[in-house]
Amino acid sequence: MKILAVCGMGLGSGLLLRMQAEKALRTLGVQADLEVADIGTARAAAQTADLIITSNELAQQLQGVKPKIVTISNFIDLQEMVTKLGAALGKG
Amino acid sequence: MRSLELAATEGPLSSRLPPEAIRVGVTAGDWRAAVRAVGEALVASGATTAAYTDEMIATVDALGPYIVIAPGIALAHARPSGAVRRTGFAIVTLAEPVAFGHTENDPVRIVVGLAAPDETGHVDALATLADFLADPDRQRALLEAHDPAAIHALVLAYERGRDDGAAPAPTRPVEGGGETDTGAAETKAERSGGIA
């Protein structure tokens, strides 16, 4: 299982997504590799990913990629991440 | 206590967010003015040159308002560049909410500025800031603060409270033993996970 956190540049909001996803995966009891990609390299990185987490805005720029996309509105709300990741992973 | 000294030299959030990098009750007519204000705060603290402010604005122009990472909170930043002198954070609270064009998280009341000279040096401080802002009471206190010193004190108090809270934890085998920066972050992560 590889999860890709996608943001504009890979060092601001994408890092936040990765941090939150790490906590959420612990809560959910799921093991997965987490990587961060910026929007410019996300399409290539998505080819080996099972799931993408990103914002609504950036999700629209990723239409057509193979992995399922989970969109997060509030990047610092752990409950949203747990709920949405859980649902996407069949743990909801 | 060597590990604590080491953590201090690596720079907790409070040392990367000095009072000079904090502006309270700024009036901004639009998102550009709001990002410019946080850019000026980064410049004032010595973290960046003025060119970085333009780079942050160009980022939003190119990629859209995705930088509004939570209701009312924007995280402005650009790529590591020659305009970044060292890892730095800035906070601007706005007198009136400003629309950034985000479909869910507008309007913005708090603008955070981030300057990173590389891809890793800011990670721990960013995690601290995210956890600090995740609590509605702390967010409210930040918005109600009347001067930069008060916001800096809130951040310092949060760091100290978190470190104190982490101290009794090593009865459990937490990674890193709870003394290093990473260990404290792990303990805190579990704690906030438990609350949520």
Image: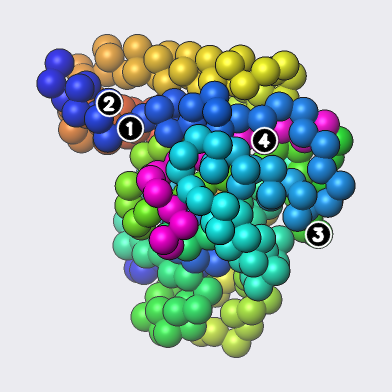
Residues tagged by mark 3 and mark 1 found on one chain of the structure: yes
> Is B105 situated above or below B149?
below
Kindly identify which chain the residue marked by label 2 belongs to. B
CA gap, disc 3 and disc 2: 38 Å
The residue identified by callout 3 is: B101
The answer to whether the residues at label 1 and label 2 have Cβ atoms under 8 Å apart is yes
x 48%, y 14%: residue: B157
Give the mark toward the camera: 3 or 2. 2
Q: Which residue is mark 4?
A: B92
**Quarter residue A47 falls in:** bottom left
Callout 1: residue from which chain? Answer: B
Secondary structure under tag 1 reads: loop
Per the model, the C-alpha gap separating discs 3 and 1 is 34 Å
Q: Residue at x 40, y 49 (%)?
A: B85
* Amino acid of disc 2: Ala
Disc 4 is attached to a residue of which chain?
B
Residue at left offset 20%, top offset 22%: B5
Q: Nearer the viewer, mark 3 or mark 4?
A: 4
- Position of A19 with respect to B139 (left or right) is left
**Looking at the image, which residue sits at the far left?**
B2
Disc 1: which residue: B11
Between B103 and A87, the one lying in front of the other is: B103
Disc 1 residue type (three-letter):
Gly
- Marks 3 & 2 on one chain: yes
Which residue is tagged 2?
Answer: B8
Image side of residue B52 versus residue B168, left or right: right
- Residue B44 appears in view: yes
Q: Look at label 3 and name its amino acid.
A: Gly
Q: Nearer the viewer, residue B13 or A25?
A: B13
Q: Earlier in the sequence, mark 3 or mark 1?
A: 1
Q: Earlier in the sequence, mark 1 or mark 4?
A: 1
In 3D space, how far apart are the residues under numbered discs 4 and 2 (Cα atoms)?
25 Å
